[in-house]
Amino acid sequence: MTWFWRYLLGYVTVKISGLSLEKMLNLIGVEGIRIWGVKRPSHTVMTAKVGKGRLEALLDAASRSRCKVEILGRRGLPYLWHNLLKRKVLVFGVALFVAALIFLSSFIWDVEVVGTEKLDPAGIMAYLSSQNVKPGIRQSEVDFHVLADDILGAFPELSWVGISMKGMRLHVEVVEGEPKPEMIDESVPADIVAGRDAVVYEITALAGKAKVKAGDTVRKGDVLIEGVLGPEERQIRVRAKGTVLGRVYYEGTVVRNMNEDVAAETGRTAVRRYIDMGTWTVPVEGEKPDYADYELSQRRTPLLGKLYFPVYLVEEEYREVIRGVAEKDADSVAKAALEEAYQQALAQVPDPESVLERKDKVTVEGGELKATVYLEVSESIGVVEP
């Protein structure tokens, strides 16, 4: 956090020129004047930063070594405050802005519902609106515990409701309950039919008559176990019972580009810090560099808490890069793509333990690698149909 204290106390960027720079640097060391960010483009010129409180000592050392000092810029809270005092309208605007943030933070400005799977969140939003819980209402007018109980009463499908504030957003999190199991009338006659296309792997008829055998190919809707008992001339309809396992197939396909963009860092970096107040920004330290190409990482730290209109301290790091194109290693790309395709196919399988066989296929064409994994699975394909 050294930069924070430097900004708090203020610092100056100076350009020092002369034939006795080494003598001046020696004087700076003897006097204990701390400087940083030193750059020396030539033997007679250098730039550096020095704390506001040590500027006079630096100027004295320059005078004694017959060097010239030019002030390039002033940064930090003291200079910012000095400039603000000269711009009273801006000071008033900032004060008004902060006061508005504090006032607005006591209201609800957005409502969100999360956690729904089968239930339409629009229904919960409509219910909240009917209870006058909508953007523009004061937070103090809403009793979160009572509202959660009311939502549970209005939506029997829910098993839990939690309500909290995230900034100025009302966050409603719900958990849906498990649906009640469907009641089956065992007295109603029914057949067991194929729920999907497959090759019959194993069939066991506990009640009814098997219509297919292992190795038969069936289509969706074909009768597998007919719900009948007795000889053909005196058959009676019953509810078929049994299990039918079939060989079914799942596949996963992944396509990968064999060329990739690469960025090599040159080692040159620059850091820029500023305060972001929405439409306004206040520079703190550093400037955006004039790199031809760079990669940027940014860190945003809220200064006024998690408000709906937050004020952030933003720190940006620029890293100069040189970009190019490289061809990937085919073996490593194929290995990774096959694993991803396998996981994609496996995610479709109801029971991973039922996988009988795996087949892989890899093709490369037009700079693209295509990996496909086929899984042959043994699973129940029977569906009861009255």
Image (tube, rainbow, N blue to C red):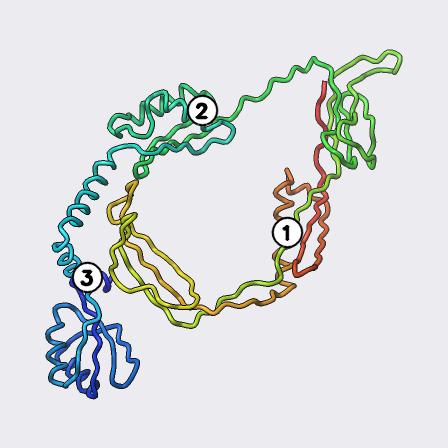
Mark 2 secondary-structure assignment: helix
Mark 3 secondary-structure assignment: loop
At a point 15% along the width and 58% down the height, the residue shown is 83
- Locate residue 68: give its quadrant: bottom left
Q: Which residue is mark 3?
A: 76
CB of mark 3 within 8 Å of CB of mark 2?
no
* Horizontal arrangement in the rendering, residue 205 relative to residue 321 (left or right): right
* Horizontal arrangement in the rendering, residue 152 relative to residue 62 (left or right): right
Which of discs 1 and 3 lies nearer the camera? The answer is: 3
Between residue 7 and residue 159, name the one nearer to us. Answer: 7
Q: Which residue is mark 1?
A: 254
Which one is earlier in the sequence, the residue at label 2 or at label 1?
Answer: 2
Which of discs 3 and 2 lies nearer the camera? The answer is: 3
Which one is earlier in the sequence, the residue at label 3 or at label 2?
Answer: 3
Task: Please provide percent x and percent y for residue 340.
Answer: 61, 51
Q: Quadrant of the N terminus?
A: bottom left
Task: Please provide percent x and percent y for residue 267.
Answer: 40, 72
Task: Please provide percent x and percent y for residue 150.
Answer: 36, 21
Tell how many labels.
Answer: 3
* Horizontal arrangement in the rendering, residue 170 relative to residue 382 (left or right): left
Amino acid type assigned to the residue bearing label 2 in the image = Gly
Mark 1 secondary-structure assignment: strand
- Locate residue 41: give its quadrant: bottom left
Amino acid type assigned to the residue bearing label 1 in the image = Val
Q: Residues within 10 Å of mark 3 (few under 14, many from 20)?
A: many
Q: Quadrant of the C terminus?
A: top right
Q: Which residue is mark 2?
A: 123
Which one is earlier in the sequence, the residue at label 1 or at label 3?
Answer: 3
Amino acid type assigned to the residue bearing label 3 in the image = Gly
CB of mark 2 within 8 Å of CB of mark 1?
no
